[in-house]
Image (cartoon, rainbow, N blue to C red):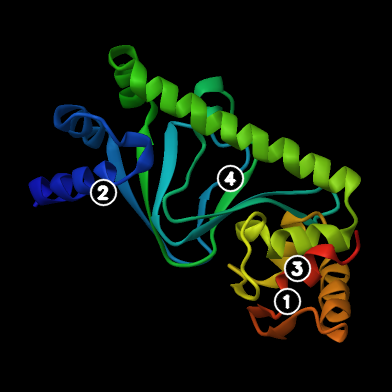
Amino acid sequence: MHGNQSINIEALLSHVPLFNGLEKDEIARIARGTREVNAVRGDILFHKGDVSTGFHLIVYGQVKLAFTSAQGGEKVVDILSQGHSFGEAVMFMEKPYMVFAQALSDSLLLHISKTVILEELEKDPKLGRKMIAGLSLRLHHLITDVESYSLHSGRQRIIGYLLRENMESDVKSLVVTLPTNKGVIASRLNLTQEHFSRILHELSEKGLIIVAGRKITIPDVEKLRCYDH
């Protein structure tokens, strides 16, 4: 039985962008240090303060990274889905997790052990470059977030979020499906849920968006993009 499982894990690993270009035997070695994690919605994958023994990769599903404030409120740091990995930085720093991770939907993850990754990094500089590129990209996103919280109004943040996949494209209209509930997205954008809802309401009053549950239709992308600038 175990043999099938490792073939399955190897197949999954070979489809991950991070491991593209690795040889079969390299994938096989990483698979030996990888275990499947099945999580149902609401499961905590790790708590803040837990010690890291590797990093996670999402095969399917959705995970939020968040921390709880002293007042008991929750701040969502990120919402991650299929193909995303998380926890690499903490793994390299040898520090406990600074956030907790929770499954937002039923998910399958792979946990890749630190030992096996460190061994592969010794052997293969390509993997090191890819991991550095991934971490750099995340750092870039983080700086963009901080800039957005500091310089942009709540309205601009929400418009930016709705158009995030289409900032450069010239599509005329768009339908966006929110990946999770409004409270989680509001927290991710550093807004209260009330503020988030108020802005969505204002944008729909103006006819810039049409909200139906999690589905948001944007009849005129350019109009929305130019609003509040």
**Which of labels 1 and 4 is toward the front?**
1
Q: Is residue 97 visible?
A: no
Q: Secondary structure at mark 4?
A: loop
Residue at 58% across, 29% down? 136
Q: CA distance from mark 4 to mark 3?
A: 42 Å
Q: Mark 2 sits on what residue?
A: 12
Q: Position of residue 174 (x, y in %)?
A: 62, 74
Circles 1 and 3 in contact, beta carbons < 8 Å: yes
Q: Which residue is mark 4?
A: 47
Label 1 belongs to which residue? Answer: 220
Q: Nearer the viewer, mark 2 or mark 1?
A: 1
Q: Amino acid at mark 3?
A: Glu
Circles 4 and 3 in contact, beta carbons < 8 Å:
no
Q: Are marks 1 and 4 in contact (CB under 8 Å)?
A: no
Mark in front: 4 vs 2: 2
Q: Label 3 belongs to which residue?
A: 222
> Marks 2 and 1, Cα distance to the nearest angstrom?
39 Å
Q: Earlier in the sequence, mark 4 or mark 2?
A: 2
Instruction: Tell which of 188 and 173 is nearer to you.
Output: 173
